[in-house]
Amino acid sequence: MDGNSEFPFQSNFEIPFDLFVRKKSEGLGTPGSLRFTDSKGHLVYRVQHPIDNSTNWNSTRCTKLLLDASGDTLFSVNRVNKGSWKGFRGNVNSGDTGFIFKVNRTLDEFSRKEFDIVLVGDHSEGSKTEMKMKGCPFKRSCTIYKGDSIVAETSLMYKLGIGKAFVPRNRFRVTIFPGFADHGLIVSLVAIFFDGRKIWI
């Protein structure tokens, strides 16, 4: 990662990177987590609500944490209202965070959702990168753009191979295309896109 850029773009990152997503139940009465694995099934990221025994569940349900495979918190995502989110680097509950991005939903139809994304550097409100996110949650279809370029997209995995069973709709693929180095940020945005789909996320 380039220390001079909060959200680096790498010209030498030439191969699309796939993550495979599924919902995992954590037990009766405990909210499930969203797991992102590599092609070999190794855990890369996990998205879950904060676990705080001293806090009522209703007060934490608007926050999601993005954790790496070691359980370290990379991003905290807070839902500000029904169509707006803010993202912070680190664990917002610990206070060791920096405001990183904000997302506003601009279109909310049954078959189409659209979002505006503004990335803000840790130390400079004047340094911003604008992105967009569009798609259909029911089809597990989400495309993230920076300008005219596609940064990442999600898609259903209809079959694992010839003759094999269909993959359930609660499992899908995230493909991150060459150029955007912060995969954790992309995972956070995907979690926002599908936020509120209580049946499977």
Image: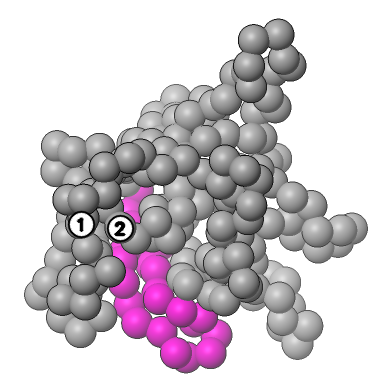
Amino acid of disc 1: Phe
Q: Name the residue located 15 percent from the left edge and 80 percent from the top edge.
A: 124
Along the line of sight, the residue nearer the viewer: 88 or 78? 88
User: Does residue 190 belong to the magenta stretch?
Assistant: no
Image quadrant containing the N terminus: bottom left
Residue where numbered disc 2 is placed: 181
Residue 106 % position (x, y): 30, 44
Residue 41 % position (x, y): 65, 45
Give the secondary structure at mark 1: loop
Does residue 70 appear left or right of residue 107 in this picture? right
Give the secondary structure at mark 2: loop
- When the figure is inspected, residue 138 is found, relative to residue 51, above or below; the finding is above
Residue where numbered disc 1 is placed: 9
Q: Quadrant of residue 111?
A: top left
Q: Is residue 109 visible?
A: no
The reply to whether the C-beta atoms of the residues labelled 1 and 2 are less than 8 Å apart is yes
Q: Name the residue located 12 percent from the left edge and 72 percent from the top edge.
A: 127
Q: Main secondary structure of the magenta part?
A: strand
Amino acid of disc 2: Ala
Colour logic: one colour
Q: Name the residue located 40 percent from the left edge and 76 percent from the top edge.
A: 89
Separation of residues labelled 1 and 2 (CA atoms): 6 Å
Residue reaching furthest to the left = 126
Q: Name the residue located 74 percent from the left edge and 16 percent from the top edge.
A: 165
- First in sequence, mark 1 or 2: give its number: 1
Q: Which residues are magenta?
A: 84-107
